[in-house]
């Protein structure tokens, strides 16, 4: 995804951050996470393949970290907005941009792991039509091996809930009948 403006949010700019150009995003993590989450988020900031920020009038106010543990599944690792800039649509803009990016990459499904008590985060993902799922359901749909590859990238602790969204708008043609059947089956799960 190249730099872009969201027409419904004038003045907001989304930008990619290649590895090595992310350290200045740390303050947003520090004011968004604590404890094990902050430790894991800092580690992820350096390691994840995709990081995008959102800026308002030139000041970076939020970020999202993404990866693709298996070709058809996208993972929203962390999404965070500076305290003073919340509830203005920035988190939604970052998540929408992530879904568009994953769609462009041919990803069929996006997953995220969210703290059960994190009302803003749950609200954000629910507002973008994510549904709650479980590790057992993921394993049933994608198989144990793929599920383990997804989980290996997440910080899934007992009080977390895994959420998923099938990208129904994907227009990439299926290459095999089996792939098409699989996508149809997955979309019927929501
Ligand atoms: C979660 C977070 C990224 C949301 O960012 P945001 O910019 O405030 O979100 P938006 O303003 O775009 O809100 C989008 C939707 O999310 C939901 N939402 C956001 N904040 C909410 C809150 N405090 N309570 C309930 N729902 C909330 C709403 O459905 C909202 O839509 P609405 O404004 O039309 O009601 C932000 O609260 C944050 O950075 N939290 C700390 C870090 C974190 O916990 N990240 C998630 C785990 S990775």
Image: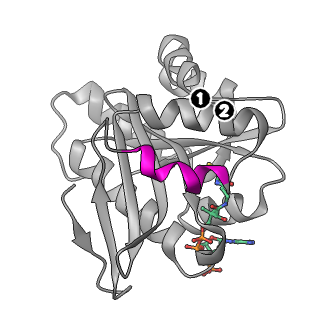
> Split into 4 quadrants, where in the image is the N terminus?
bottom left
State which mark lies toward you, 2 or 1.
2
Instruction: Please indicate whether residue 53 sits to the left or right of residue 29 in the image.
Output: left
Q: Residue pushed farthest top? A: 145
- Part of the protein shown in magenta: 22-30
Regarding residue 85, the answer to whether it shows in the image is: yes
Q: Is residue 82 above or below residue 113?
A: below
- Residue 60 placed where, x, y %? 43, 67
Q: Which residue is found at the position 37% from the left and 38% from the top?
A: 183
Q: Tell me which image quadrant ligand 1 sits in.
A: bottom right
Magenta run includes residue 26: yes
Q: Which of 175 and 70 is in front in this view?
A: 70
- Residue 124 placed where, x, y %? 62, 65
Report the Cα–Cα distance between label 2 and label 1. 13 Å
Q: Which residue is found at the position 53% from the left and 24% from the top?
A: 153
Q: In which quarter of the image is residue 68?
A: top left
Regarding residue 169, the answer to whether it shows in the image is: no
Q: Earlier in the sequence, mark 2 or mark 1?
A: 2
Q: Is residue 51 above or below residue 49?
A: below
Q: In which quarter of the image is residue 11?
A: bottom left
Q: Nearer the viewer, residue 21 or 33?
A: 21
Q: Is residue 109 above or below residue 130?
A: above
Local packing at callout 1 (Cα closer than 10 Å; few below 14, some 14-19, many 20+) is some
Total of numbered circles in the picture? 2
Q: Name the residue under label 2.
A: 39
Q: Mark 1 points at which residue?
A: 154
**Pointer 2 with pointer 1, Cβ within 8 A:** no
**Model colouring:** one colour
Q: Is mark 2 on a helix, strand or loop?
A: helix
């Amino acid at each position: 995804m190249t730099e872009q403006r969201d027409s419904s949010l004038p003045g907001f700019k989304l930008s990619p951050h290649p590895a090595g150009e992310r350290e200045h995003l740390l303050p947003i993590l520090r004011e968004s996470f604590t404890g094990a989450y902050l430790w894991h988020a800092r580690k992820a900031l350096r390691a994840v393949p995709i990081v995008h920020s959102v800026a308002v009038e030139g000041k970076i106010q939020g970020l999202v970290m993404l990866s693709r543990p298996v070709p058809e599944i996208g993972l929203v690792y962390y999404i965070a907005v500076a305290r003073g800039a919340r509830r203005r649509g920035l988190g939604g803009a970052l998540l929408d941009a992530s879904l568009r990016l994953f769609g462009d990459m041919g990803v069929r499904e996006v997953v995220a792991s969210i703290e059960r008590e994190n009302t803003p985060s749950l609200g954000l993902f629910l507002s973008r039509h994510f549904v709650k799922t479980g590790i057992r359901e993921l394993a049933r749909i994608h198989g144990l091996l793929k599920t383990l590859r997804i989980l290996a990238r997440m910080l899934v602790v007992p009080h977390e809930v895994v959420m998923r969204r099938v990208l129904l708008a994907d227009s990439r043609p299926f290459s095999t009948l089996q792939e098409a059947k699989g996508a149809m089956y997955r979309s019927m799960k929501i």
